[in-house]
Amino acid sequence: MDTALLERSFAGLGLDFPTLFPSLEPYRDHEWIVKNLPRISTIINAVPPEAQMRTQPWEEWYIQEGKRHHHVLYLKKPPRYDEIFEAPAHDDVHPPRTLGKNWYVIDDPDFSPVLLRASGSR
């Protein structure tokens, strides 16, 4: 995990990485992918290890059409969700391990990382 890259990328979204992530422990085994896409902006993905994809969310932060987003995506249906994302078999936006699956999406107005909320690390 390149924390300097993550700091710069979150700053580009108007978010302060050290404030959002006072601890990286719950995310240490996540795959972090930062992409710069002209039609979206910078998109930051935190994808859990394969063995934990059914129990932990995939999170993404980005700006689209001037609005900042934090999506929290689950394979298992949560009590509340905003939409279902049917990930295509291939695209150049989403992490490869997330493709070809159906995800329950929460458009979260809280930009803090979900695993830090649950662990009390924030």
Image: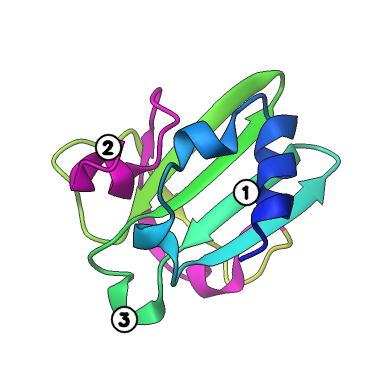
Check residue 95 for magenta coloring.
yes
Residue at 38% x, 50% y: name it.
73
Marks 2/3: CA–CA distance: 23 Å
Q: Which residue is mark 3?
A: 51
Marks 3/1: CA–CA distance: 21 Å
Residue type, mark 1 in image: Ile
Residue at 72% x, 42% y: name it.
9
> In the image, residue 110 lies at what x, y percent?
38, 26
> In the image, residue 2 lies at what x, y percent?
67, 62
> In the image, residue 116 lies at what x, y percent?
31, 45
Q: Which residue is mark 2?
A: 81
Point out which mark residue 88 bears: none
**In the figure, is residue 121 to the left or right of 97?**
left
Q: Which residue is mark 1?
A: 44
In the picture, the quarter occupied by the N terminus is: bottom right
What span is in magenta? 93-122
**In the figure, is residue 44 to the left or right of 57?**
right
